[in-house]
Image (cartoon, helix red, strand yellow):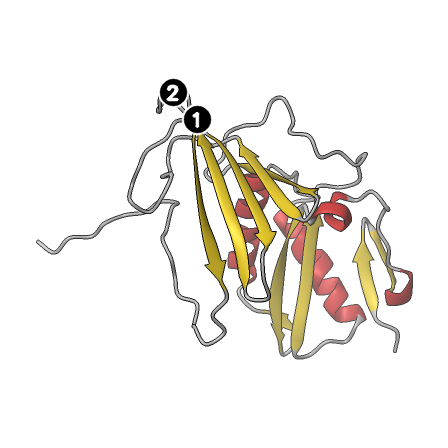
Amino acid sequence: MSRIVYVNGRYVPYAQAAVHAEDRGFQFGDGIYEVCEVRGGRLIDEARHMQRLARSLGELKIAAPMSAPALGHVMREVIRRNRVKDGLVYLQVTRGAAPREFLFPADTEPTFMGDSVGRWEGDTLVVDVTGFNDKTWVDTEGHQHSDALHVIERYRRSGAETIDYQVTIDDPKTYQQSWTSSRVLTRHPEWTLKEYVCEENNKITRQP
């Protein structure tokens, strides 16, 4: 049996499923996704998936393609057409097709961690970040910043196990001048990644 995929209003065979060449999800990863479990032919935790989908779309300011009930109907129809009893349904929503453009929009609304644009300068990856609000820290020591913060990060592979990292901080509302800091990032394959620091909605709980 041929797999069936829903793409932009149409149920089509898997081999024919396609998006526009300038879809921003295809070019920039500008989109979000949900993976929903199917058990006994039924969606598991559908309401919570739809709530998280709506929240993610809202954070990225991507318009919902249809209402939550309509999306639920589409997913159940995909399950029915593919005769899925136990498995997964993958749902992806992108910003859609638009001319390829890297520049920041002039009316960008500040977000918690800024809007990042990357480019290559020779063998160095440069990440230019603007669009911050004032709800996060410059570092894990708690140094504050304003919505005028501008961060430029540079990453250059300096060896088989090392990356030279440099960051420039500029915030005329908070600091008298910009400054640059650098360090060497070393790969440690024997290390286990751990949670670092929560920037969004961070709360300190104290025992009475």
Image coordinates for residue 185, horizontal then vertical, percent = 48, 57
In the image, which disc is placed on residue 173? 2
Question: SS class of the residue under badge 1?
Answer: loop
Specify whether 15 is left or right of 156. right
Specify whether 138 is left or right of 1. left
In the image, which disc is placed on residue 147? 1
Question: SS class of the residue under badge 2?
Answer: loop
Of all residues, the one furthest to the right in this rendering is 16
Residue 106 visible in the displayed image: yes
- Marks 1 and 2: in contact by CB < 8 Å? yes
Q: In which quarter of the image is residue 134?
A: top left
Residue 47 visible in the displayed image: no
Nearer-N-terminus badge (2/1) = 1
Query: Amino acid type of disc 2?
Result: Lys
Q: Which residue is drawn at 57% across and 53% down?
A: 50
Mark toward the viewer: 2 or 1: 2
Q: Which residue is drawn at 83% across and 42% down?
A: 22
Image coordinates for residue 94, horizontal then vertical, percent = 70, 46
Query: Amino acid type of disc 1?
Result: Asp
Image coordinates for residue 190, horizontal then vertical, percent = 45, 76
Specify whether 179 is left or right of 87. left
Q: Residues within 10 Å of mark 1 (few under 14, many from 20)?
A: many
Q: Residue at x 54, y 35 (%)?
A: 129
141, above or below 171, in the image = below
